[in-house]
Image (cartoon, grey):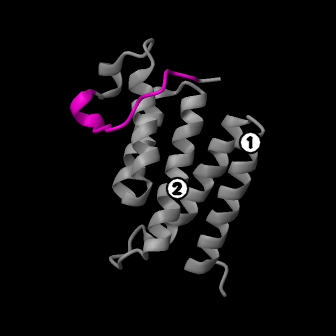
Amino acid sequence: MAAGSKDGLVDSAVLHKEQGNKLFGAKKWADAVTEYTAGIEAMAAPHASSTQTVPPEQRLLRAVLFNNRAQCHLKLQQWQLAVDDATTALTTDASVEAKALFRRASVWACDHVCVGCVGLNESTLHVPFFLAPCNTG
């Protein structure tokens, strides 16, 4: 397999996701963001100028990377970045919908967040489940 092959880039993205997960577990959220970002960038490389359809498993991996990074942004209280990444996860692969919607709703549920500042309202959330109180700790 060539170093720049799609499989090699997917393997790289998986490694970055796993490292990001370890850092997240250690509450090193900013470092986890760096790893998830590297994974996202690795996934983007083979498809940047391609017109080919992205395989479902690669779409899912990309969505998970954005979704995981959204959770880090929540922990870091980077509200707009959390919303942006959760929204990207939603539009990348529908199978991450529940977690991505919950992450967007978590921003909305925090009473100290200017909801209008992050472009959320009840009609954009589509949350059919109970919202937990804001917990950034």
Residue marked by disc 1: 25
Q: Residue at x 57, y 23 (%)?
A: 135
Res 38 → quadrant: bottom right
How many residues crowd mark 2 within 10 Å: few (<14), some (14–19), many (20+)?
A: many
Q: Which residues are magenta?
A: 121-135
| Type of the residue with mark 1 | Gly
Residue at 41 percent across and 22 percent down: it is 109
C-alpha distance separating marks 2 and 1 = 16 Å
Q: Amino acid at mark 2?
A: Val
Name the residue tied to disc 2.
64
Mark positioned earlier in the residue sequence (2 or 1): 1
Q: Where is residue 131 drawn, in percent x and y? A: 42, 28
Tell me the element at label 1: helix
Q: Position of residue 65 (x, y in %)?
A: 55, 54
Given the current orientation, which residue lies at the most extreme front position?
130
Examine the structure image and report whether residue 133 is included in the region drawn in magenta.
yes
